[in-house]
């Protein structure tokens, strides 16, 4: 079974700045005016006896399955060349095992996709990282962009390829980088025996902000080595206010969060933040990280984490120094959906697919200005996603990597920082941010773009002029 579509894109320069993604079915390649890449085979979520477990999520205890740094957890799975991996202008690749590690099933007939946090650690050159099923074409997308010396994490939905392996590509510059891979869960095919959870995307709502005391007993940053517990089932959100943004229902088994670390305090230092479902034994700390922060940095990363079955909460951990933490709920995972329904099933694409890049002429080559928002229509895109030549049907959203490619000043003498917020076009703009950015290096973050009733989303920029890129990796079905 394969997904085949041909894409070309237009930007219309009307007053409302409406953007349109137009995709027409004509074969098995994705064609963009500036590049061509293959579309990879998709494992179908359809079976003779119905949808079953297809596209449903199975949470794992967070586990580190790969680390190229010698002597650390995950390094036992390192591959040649051992240690830091080369970065080259044409792209250097290496393959890692995905199936059978960290609780992921061993059979490729069970696994539709895997949720992994991939980290580039202290590269000696600049470039980008992409990840795709082994023996499949790479495409033109990127999961992580980085510069020399910068440790950058990003959540991704990836599909195992030949031998249950994942190919990782480091390209654009010259140098070397260490790579870390943590896994958090997997999406099942319809052939899987066990049913999983469905994804319910929501308009983002803020549930924790240590700068204001929201969701916390005091207005204070997280200290070094500190754990804090946050109630998730039945939690209320602010900006906009929403009671029970996550239902108080025992069938809610996980939450999808956009986590921002604000590490610019005088007492801050390089650190990492982790999110886990349950308390650890005294003296232990989490074995995985969700967000790596340098001193002075403000950065976001998406998190998918199980909820503790007993108290309906999650736990946050800060490794070193002091850091403020902000959490926005962007979705939740719930069990017991009717097997005959489609809503909330996630269908990963074969590899990340470049949907638009505002730097390119075919999209106008015009940045988004300060305090401005613009619409993107995904109606043609949604209508063109197929499995085995058959349209997957109605969708409620798309999951992918949003990257701020460049941020420039509005006034030459005034430095600028900003954020991008993505939300349904028929909803009010929330105060949450999907990614935070400053002048200099590109900034990536995984984003759920929940569609409006008209299959549109809106992107808002706070300050300066920003070019940005979106690479789709999965779609969310609806009834």
Image (tube, helix red, strand yellow):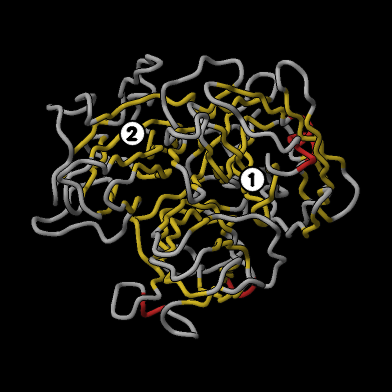
Q: Residue at x 80, y 40 (%)?
A: 362
Residue 235 on image: x %, y %: 30, 24
Q: Which residue is at a point 25% across and 55% down the rendered structure image? A: 270
Task: Answer left or right for 106 relative to 288.
Answer: right
Please tell me which residue lies in front, 297 or 141: 297
- Depth check: give the residue in front, 244 or 196: 244
User: Closest to the observer: 383 or 306?
Assistant: 383
In the image, is residue 133 above or below residue 77?
above
Residue sticking out furthest to the front: 413
Q: Which residue is mark 2?
A: 327
Q: What residue is disc 1 on?
A: 472
Q: Is residue 19 visible?
A: yes
User: Which mark sits nearer the N-terminus, 2 or 1?
Assistant: 2
Q: Would residue 183 be found to the left or right of residue 288 on screen? A: right
Could you tell me how many numbered marks the image carries? 2
Q: Residues within 10 Å of mark 1 (few under 14, many from 20)?
A: many
Residue at the image position 78 percent from the left and 31 percent from the top: 11
């Amino acid at each position: 079974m394969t997904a085949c579509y041909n894409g070309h894109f237009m930007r219309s320069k009307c007053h409302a700045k409406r953007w349109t993604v137009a995709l027409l079915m004509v074969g098995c390649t994705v064609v963009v005016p500036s590049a061509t890449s293959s579309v990879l085979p998709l494992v179908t979520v359809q079976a003779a006896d119905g949808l079953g477990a297809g596209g449903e999520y199975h949470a794992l205890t967070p586990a580190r399955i790969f680390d190229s740094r010698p002597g650390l957890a995950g390094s036992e799975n390192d591959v040649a060349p051992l240690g830091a991996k080369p970065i080259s202008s044409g792209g250097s690749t290496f393959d890692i095992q995905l199936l059978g590690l960290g609780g992921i099933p061993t059979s490729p007939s069970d696994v539709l996709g895997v949720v992994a946090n991939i980290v580039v650690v202290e590269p000696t050159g600049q470039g980008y990282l992409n990840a795709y099923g082994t023996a499949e074409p790479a495409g033109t997308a990127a999961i992580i962009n980085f510069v020399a010396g910068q440790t950058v994490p990003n959540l991704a939905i990836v599909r195992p390829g030949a031998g249950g392996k994942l190919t990782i590509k480091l390209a654009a510059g010259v140098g070397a980088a260490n790579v870390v891979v943590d896994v958090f869960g997997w999406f099942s095919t319809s052939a899987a025996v066990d049913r999983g959870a469905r994804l319910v995307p929501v308009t983002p709502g803020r549930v924790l902000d240590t700068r204001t005391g929201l969701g916390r007993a005091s207005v204070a940053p997280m200290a070094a080595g500190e754990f804090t517990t946050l109630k998730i089932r039945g939690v209320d959100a602010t900006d906009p206010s929403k009671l029970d943004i996550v239902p108080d229902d025992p069938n809610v088994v996980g939450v999808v969060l956009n986590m921002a670390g604000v590490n610019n305090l005088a007492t801050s230092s390089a650190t990492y933040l982790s999110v886990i479902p349950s308390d650890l034994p005294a003296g232990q700390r989490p074995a995985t990280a969700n967000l790596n922060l340098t001193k002075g940095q403000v950065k976001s990363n998406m998190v998918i984490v199980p909820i503790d079955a007993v108290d309906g909460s999650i736990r946050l951990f800060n490794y070193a120094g002091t850091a403020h933490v902000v959490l926005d709920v962007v979705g939740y995972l719930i069990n017991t959906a009717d097997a005959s329904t489609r809503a909330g099933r996630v269908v990963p694409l074969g590899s990340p697919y470049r949907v638009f890049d505002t730097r390119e002429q075919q999209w106008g080559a015009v940045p988004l200005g300060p305090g401005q928002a613009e619409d993107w229509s995904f109606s043609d895109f949604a209508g063109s996603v197929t499995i085995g030549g058959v349209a997957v049907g109605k969708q409620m959203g798309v999951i992918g990597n949003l990257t701020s490619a460049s941020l420039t000043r509005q006034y030459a003498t005034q430095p600028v920082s900003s954020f991008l917020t993505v939300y349904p076009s028929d909803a009010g703009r929330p105060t949450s941010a999907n990614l935070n950015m400053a002048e200099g290096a590109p900034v990536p973050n995984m984003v759920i773009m929940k569609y409006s009733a008209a299959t549109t989303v809106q992107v808002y920029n706070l300050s300066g002029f920003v070019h940005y890129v979106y690479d789709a990796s999965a779609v969310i079905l609806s009834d």
